[in-house]
Amino acid sequence: MKRPTIHDVAAAAGVSRGTVSRLLNGDKYVSPAARVAIERAISETGYVVNRAARSLVTQRTGSVVMVLSEPHEKLFEDPNYSTLIRVAIRMLAERDLSLVMMMAGDEGDRERVVRYVRGGHADGVLLVSTHAGDPLLDALGGGPPAVSCGAVIGRETVIPYAAADDRLGARQMTEYFVGLGRRRIAMITGPMDTPGGIQRLEGFADVLGRKATQRLIAHGDWTQASGERAMTELLERAPDLDAVFVASDLMAAGALAALRAAGRRVPDDVAVGGFDDSSVAVSTHPPLTTIRQPLAEMAQETLRLLLALIDGAGHVEPVILPTELVIRESA
Amino acid sequence: MKRPTIHDVAAAAGVSRGTVSRLLNGDKYVSPAARVAIERAISETGYVVNRAARSLVTQRTGSVVMVLSEPHEKLFEDPNYSTLIRVAIRMLAERDLSLVMMMAGDEGDRERVVRYVRGGHADGVLLVSTHAGDPLLDALGGGPPAVSCGAVIGRETVIPYAAADDRLGARQMTEYFVGLGRRRIAMITGPMDTPGGIQRLEGFADVLGRKATQRLIAHGDWTQASGERAMTELLERAPDLDAVFVASDLMAAGALAALRAAGRRVPDDVAVGGFDDSSVAVSTHPPLTTIRQPLAEMAQETLRLLLALIDGAGHVEPVILPTELVIRESA
DNA sequence: GTGAAAGCGCTAACAT
DNA sequence: ATGTTAGCGCTTTCAC
């Protein structure tokens, strides 16, 4: 038989559709007798609400859209996303919300996202790795609430977010190097238009002061290849370096390869510190001493913010979570 | 003003709602004059269709659900998923379908997925790493079309899929070892209830015949730690081994650590071959010789199958894609 | 080729 | 505490 509707349930329970609807929506004005009858009818008929019909009247969609602004290759390598996706699915499911994924890589994508969101197809927006000045940011204004996992540069006060304390993490690693007695500490940063790129360098400079010179700083783009390139460059510019703080584990794996090629021993000649504590940190040789980001908590907090907003909170504060030094063998 | 409806467009264009709807749905019985007027009205009003309303009448939802059956830790480490997600988003978006993510890890999750799918909330189901005998498989029968990326053991003829030719890949690596003159070739397999676990071992045995003895075979669970454990075990059982084919790069990274701990040089003493050609393959030392799986093509084909089914194809054939040997430094 | 009208299944306001 | 009813915005016959 056809899929049962609320009408069938009402008939089976001997009540009206309104009463069934009230029960479904948690309204308390339902008598115990009716409640029992309806619940039995629901399980007997195998009734499942039709979201489309519900949406049509409530103007809510029951879904949240996660917008991935990252260029494709990155998405491919970053465990960050998996964690966020997992946590999002879980936390949304608890509220009976579903997670829709969209990409905003090129102009066409972006237009689709805007149509989707402005078309009222999502109750909330979860931004991921959105770049500074992304046109999407303006286009999304006025729509449903949006939050970001990680700060969106330039919109820190407008788009709520949860993030790791990148600056603190960088300080922890740099201080650790100093405590180890390292004298010439270099750094390989991430792209300088990302929060991690900027703030990890800031933390590094916080500790080293004027000793953090241009000569000892090279930039990467988060890829392993860029880490290798940057390390080679540093070795040329400052052959006397005895430690290097690399802003991501993946880039650190590249740096390790460059150091090996140059005949430097790690950590004896050069101490290497990574950032992320991702799975590559333990697959390199030697395993990486690194900074752990509380990925799961970041994801959870991000979702908490979004859910609060969806529930009508007018304003929520960003959340910054502490990082932690994880000592392995590279430093 | 309120979001414009088809009614507003019709009014602005001076036609009836029916005509606008016909244009929107690609019906050809629309006069050129009406078409122009309607198109102008649409862009002037900024009209976007309301999917809920459309769904209500068409009984289609415009979305496909991806069901992740993997235990959580795995999802965390596997680049496979990212590729699939990316390709799925892209190919579905072209058809104006959206991708909804769900998890089916525990009983509660599974029940939610079943409710969702049987409740008619998805036009298609994309299964990922579903295990043999998963109760979900039966519960989903009779619903919208479902396909899997990678075979579902025991349902190969029921659930269409696209996969890499695991058996071929294993043969390629094993033959390469033989060609290298290696005499005692061991293997670390994946879990024996997964297609990759079973078929990679089959390919290994295809080449080695009776030389593939129990003594030379150990089992892992895809994690790096299990690879390390299995390698240690093999080294005890067969200290004379001179090559090891590991069914995944991540496990191979673990094997590398165990070999290093045992003082064996790679590839001089022991040749190591991985499988996947994932990002860890180049972050290990030495970089892994491995078997490349055509992840993007697998994802594309999987989606092609699903879309064909959604379009009404009664039956589609599974797709098996060739693998390729990638030689680096570990063998 | 186009308009009119009948619902799709549900919620919420209103009555009682 | 419950029934009745008016739509939500759209597609799709059915007439013309």
Image (spheres, coloured by chain):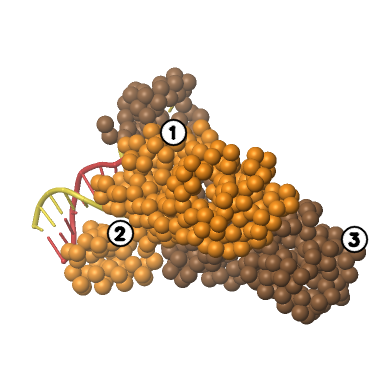
Chain colours: A orange, B brown, C yellow, D red
Q: Would you call the spot at circle 2 few (<14 residues within 10 Å), some (14-19), or many (20 or more)?
A: some
Question: In the image, B281: left or right of A159?
Answer: right
Residue where numbered disc 3 is placed: B179
Q: Amino acid at mark 1?
A: Gly
At label 2, the amino acid type is His
Quick one: label 1, few (<14), some, or many (20+) residues within 10 Å?
A: few
In the displayed structure image, the side of residue A73 where residue A316 appears, left or right: left
Name the residue carrying label 2. A7
Residue A133 got which mark? 1
* Real-space CA distance between mark 1 and mark 3, rounded to the nearest whole angstrom: 55 Å
| Residue drawn at point x = 56 percent, y = 46 percent | A187
- All told, the count of numbered labels is 3
Quadrant of the rendering where the C terminus of chain A is positioned: bottom right
Q: CA distance from mark 1 to mark 2?
A: 50 Å
Between label 1 and label 3, give the one nearer the viewer: 1
Residue at 46% across, 26% down: B30
SS for tag 1?
Answer: loop
